[in-house]
Image: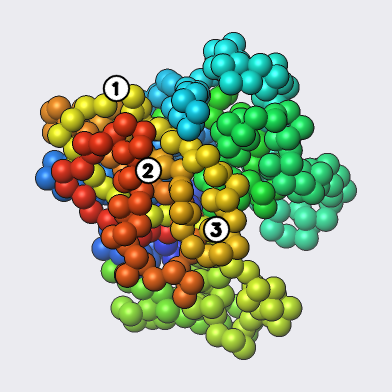
Amino acid sequence: MSAKGKVLIVGSGFGGLACAIGLAGRGYQVTILERKDLVGGKLQRIVIDGYRFDCGPNTIELPFVFRNVFRSVGRRMEDYVSLIPLEPRSRNIFTDGSVVDMTGDVEAMQHQIDTYSPVDALHYPAFLQESRMMFQSINGRLMSRLPIGNREKWNVGMLREMLSVVPLFRRSLNRELRHFFTHPNSLALFGRYAPRVGSSPFLAPSLYGMMHSCEIDHGTYSVRGGTYALVEALRELAEELGVKIKTGVEARQIRVQGGRACGIETNDGYYEAPLIVINGDLLSTTQKLLSEALRPSLNDRRIASMEPSLSAFVQLAGVPSLYDRLLHHTVFFSDRYEEEFTEIFDQRKPPSKPSVYICNSSYSEKGAAPDGHSNLFIMTYAPYLSDSWDWEEQRESYAENVLSTLRDTGYRELIRTMYSVLIRLIS
């Protein structure tokens, strides 16, 4: 296939790698610029004393999305990487002792919810049906399309489809959930989809209720070798297609001539290309890569008023024990769920009594930790970095606060080797 022209992609996360594969498969000469030493963006692998951790997504959902990337260039994903289906998808533990193992079995879900709220159990099938309708609507009308030009944006069919999903943006996820559930456990259980995308269930639009259908109908999967193995598979495929990957190269400014982007200034010199793709967040792109003269005044004011989404406080623990109660995904919910998000989004401080998420990937793959040991990725949600909270001073005390929360659940002998880091969960 003849080359169509040069393309520069800034960032080698899932989106950057997938975009590079798609463009290379269509004949473009693609170069990826990645400021880190390894590809993957925020998703990186850490191995310490035989314990393996993914700093980023610990599982994937909607595997067909990834399969389509391989299929688009005539490859099979299974020839590059293996997925491990998780069942149950996750374990959810509440302060009243209730446990809900997320599963695709509707009756099993109702039975578990019934232990603390017969009324909520009765309404669960209706919520699942609503979630499926949301997913089908969004996936068919918006997620699978990229309306870039005016012809795509403003045709009658697209306008009609966009108007049909407007109601999903008008009320919050929490308000949507209250149409079906009344018990705090249920509201927390299904409200957890909002923080997974960096928001609060009290602020995020109701359309995120569709994520329950994603989890239940399409499954949750671990990647053999850790989620970073999927990054390695995409990198291998990209390189097979001729994509050049430059690591340790940090983009500093997009150069523009005649109103069109023409290249990127980096710490490694100037890279020229008529097509540029930025696999990064809007705030960083506009504030760091565009000069003030290039920012449209209206959009600049709107962007300047935006705030980063929530972050995460993570502790990586290698533990010389096995825990039958800790599945690949386990969430210990706080009994102050609403206050959690008030502290994060309004007070800009980490929750005083947080919910705690633990990924125990050694549960589903023995090679993730030494025999008889567990690798625990312990995470709580936190505000984005700001002057409201000093992590350098408070990190150790907050780490102890998180661990004391876990000790209250009966996990007293958790830690042998601990490493505390603050990472961004969502840009």
**Disc 1 residue type (three-letter):** Asp
Side of 220 where 200 appears, left or right: right
Callout in the foreground (1, 3): 3
Q: Is residue 76 visible?
A: no
Callout in the foreground (2, 1): 2
Q: Which residue was labeled with disc 3?
A: 343
Name the disc covering residue 390, or none. Answer: none
* Residue at x-position 45% and y-position 63%: 9
Front residue of 26/302: it is 302
**Disc 3 residue type (three-letter):** Glu
- Tell me the element at label 1: loop
Side of 404 where 414 appears, left or right: left
Q: Disc 2 and disc 1: Cα gap in Å?
A: 19 Å
* Residue at x-position 21% and y-position 50%: 418
Name the disc covering residue 405, or none. Answer: 2
Name the disc covering residue 324, or none. Answer: 1
Side of 399 where 265 appears, left or right: right
Give the image quarter of residue 267. Answer: bottom left
First in residue order: circle 1 vs circle 3: 1
